[in-house]
Image: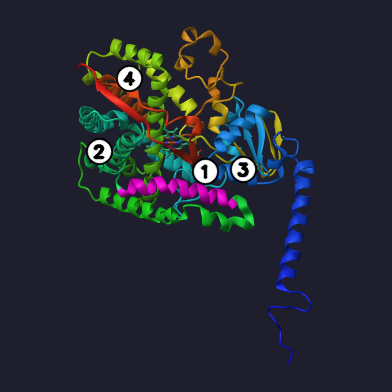
Amino acid sequence: MQVISWTKIGDFSPLHVFGVLAISYCAYYILYAVYATTVSPLAKVPGPLSRKFSYLPCAITSLRGRESHAVRDLHSKYGPVVRVSPEMVSFAAPTSWKEIYGYPGVKKFKKSGYRQLRPGVPDLLTANGVDHARQRAALNRAFSDKALREQEHYFQDHIDLFLKRMEQRCDEGNPINMVKWMEFLAFDIIGTLAFSSSFNCLEDQGYHPWVTLLMNFFKSTHYVLTARMFGIFFPLVFVFGPIRHLMKGQEHLRRSYEKVQQRLAMPEDEKRADFWTFISRQNEHKEGSMSIQEMEVNAALIIPAGSDTISTTIAGCIYLLLKNPETVASLRKELQAEFNSESEITMARLANLPYIRAVVDEALRMYPPLSGDLRREVPPEGAAICGHFIPGGTIISVYALAANENAHNFAQPHRFTPERWLKSEERPEWTKNDHLDACQPFSVGPRNCIGMSLAYAETKLILARLLWRFDLELMDDAFEIEKQKVYIMWEKPPLMVRLRRRPS
Ligand code: HEM
């Protein structure tokens, strides 16, 4: 009987087999590189050669948390359309947002690479067609202006506690890490809005374990998305990435589901105005209804979507204002002209003030909470985008940071200038050719951010009351935006500030 040896097949040792496989892979790769850079329909899209045939440049800068910056720099060099990887093209022209995410683009270009939190149960971010329209209609009520008016006291109460904590710290005379306190505040508010149950970070003066878990979750998800680009070398990334935190994604879902159940079990209360109050009202009328499972997955989406984005925006506003003291003076002037005391500061009255809105818009331009790609796929027949024909199957995106800091869209893009967002006659002459529509931090179209009004109202309220109560002094430049990393969200370094009470 012939015995087959696993260590030696005929004259081939495992080393030979490995060698043949490696040579075949290299040969395939060389052929592919030639195709990707010469014959592929994307070959003529501008971009560095290495990015046209290899995922490595994109994957490596992503792992380093610098892909948003790298794509921004590529657009400065190659123009408004850039090939960022063999399968992906980025757009930074003023019309790109509208063409890809607005009408009629939204009907043509489907989302790509989004994963359902619970397989089989679409949440707002992953639902399509009628499911998305139905869920969006249900949630729209919870994010309406009327809802926001009923919810304002939640915001004001949390800001009261936040400012009390700031006064205590201020009396101790120590610098304060504003990033940490903004995270406490934003998470407590979203907990109350989503579940009528605060995370109590401000009360306990520390991170709730769920908050810590979520912040690690962003980074791990980023690593997994990046790892896919390594193809067969995928497992290597798992060795180096903080993947253990990803397992905690399940923990986030479990906690969200549990909280929704607890919330739905609460007795009726006419004064309650959290998100589910408005959604349940709608369910009674059957139109735009939402199942309990859908409520659970949407809660799991809204907690991260509505917390870190806000703390990032406010931290960005504070840093950029303090780096530009003349803008603080202009903002104070506007607040003092409008209000006689802090108790008069409300969301409704802030809505009429142009300068504070301009400050937030300019901070969102220079420090967009979602600075990276929002992927869409070109349909099989291909499509013309920003004057370029893009073949079917290509992944397309606008990177917010790239569009916002492109000198063709904004004059002196690295200069913090809230005035560029004011009415035409009040804008400095040198900003008059800015393409304001190139900056869309909340995206555009029917799949844009549902929390946009809430985000503006919340950010302005926190900023106005903080500036009313305190003078702020920046202690160091550790927060410097240009040096920060992005793992889906910005990895925010400490923002150390000294506070001094202002006379009331
Ligand atoms: C400054 C703060 C915020 C920014 C810059 C922001 C940005 C965005 C962007 C760019 C999208 C589109 C995502 C995509 O196409 O993949 C989005 C969607 C979304 N955002 Fe926000 N967001 C912010 C605050 C909020 C808040 C406060 C909430 C909720 C409390 C929220 C909830 C959502 C939800 C549920 C979606 C999915 C909408 C849909 O697909 O129909 N966001 N956001």
Please state the horizontal and vertical placement of residue 401, each as a whole percent of the image: 54, 31
The CA distance from mark 2 to mark 1 is 40 Å
Above or below, 340 against 263 in this view is above
The stretch drawn in magenta includes residue 224? yes
Q: Which residue is mark 1?
A: 129
Label annotation for residue 350 = 4
Specify start and end residues of the magenta stretch as a single range. Answer: 209-228
Q: Which residue is mark 3?
A: 58
Specify the quadrant that holds the N terminus. Answer: bottom right
Amino acid type, label 1:
Gly
Label annotation for residue 202 = 2
**Is 212 left or right of 228, judged from the image as shown?**
left
The CA distance from mark 3 to mark 2 is 39 Å
Number of other residues with Cα within 10 Å of mark 2, as a class: few under 14, some 14 to 19, many 20 or more: many
The CA distance from mark 3 to mark 4 is 42 Å
Q: Camera-side residue: 148 or 191?
A: 191
Please state the horizontal and vertical placement of residue 238, each as a whole percent of the image: 52, 56
Magenta region's main secondary structure?
A: helix
The stretch drawn in magenta includes residue 476? no
The CA distance from mark 4 to mark 1 is 36 Å
Amino acid type, label 4:
Leu
Mark 2 residue CB less than 8 A from any atom of ligand 1: no
- Mark 4: secondary structure: helix
